[in-house]
Image (tube, helix red, strand yellow):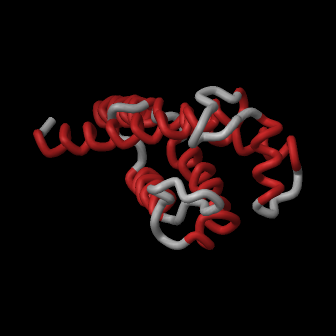
Amino acid sequence: RTTAAAMRYTGLLVLRVTLACVFVAHGMHKLFGLWSGPGVGPGGVQATADHLARVGLQGGTTLAMLAGVVQLVGGAFVGCGLLTRWAASALLGYVAIGIWKEHFRWGFFLNWVGEHGRGNGLEYSIVLVGALVCLILAGSGRWSSDGRRAADAESRAMGRARVRGKH
């Protein structure tokens, strides 16, 4: 392998693991209330359902659980590089709904000063969108479950071609 290829694989690995950490943590917060506290909120399914209702989404507990599962499972799949394009697409849908229902109205910047009554703007979501689109377009790279499966399929195809060539 060339150095450029190894750098590409490393870059995709770092991107996947970073996104996995973010989405898995958010999913665990939504589903189980982990890392609850000041600046993050109470967490858990009921608190998530209440928050979703405040931003105009109906569906309560079901929608809250779906949001948490998409983040938790989607993040884990992205981290492992398993069905990466599908998982990244599901996460992109989740982020797009957040932009539409909540972040767009607050402008571009996050609420860095913690101004009471003001939500966070688009900047964090834009970074997530860019990273997820990169994975959708580029795939998960060689150092992933998807990459391993593709390499195995390629190897089997080359073996079949060699066998056919000898007949």
Residue 148 appears in the figure? yes
* Drawn side of residue 19 relative to residue 90, left or right: left
Considering the image in quadrants, where does the C terminus appear? top left
Q: Residue at x 58, y 47 (%)?
A: 86
| Residue 161 locus on image (x, y percent) | 34, 37
| Residue 84 locus on image (x, y percent) | 51, 42
In the image as oriented, which residue stretches furthest toward the left? Answer: 3
Q: Residue at x 63, y 50 (%)?
A: 90
Q: Residue at x 41, y 42 (%)?
A: 140
| Residue 37 locus on image (x, y percent) | 61, 33
In the picture shown, does residue 54 fall above or below 16?
A: below
In the picture shown, does residue 51 fall above or below 29?
A: below
| Residue placed most toward the observer, 13 or 151 | 13
Q: Residue at x 42, y 57 (%)?
A: 127
* Drawn side of residue 57 relative to residue 12, left or right: right
In the picture shown, does residue 94 fall above or below 16?
A: below
In the image as oriented, which residue stretches furthest toward the front? Answer: 116
* Drawn side of residue 85 relative to residue 47, left or right: left
**Residue 33 lies in what quarter of the image?**
top right
Residue 160 appears in the figure? no
| Residue 22 locus on image (x, y percent) | 49, 39
* Drawn side of residue 127 relative to residue 70, left or right: left
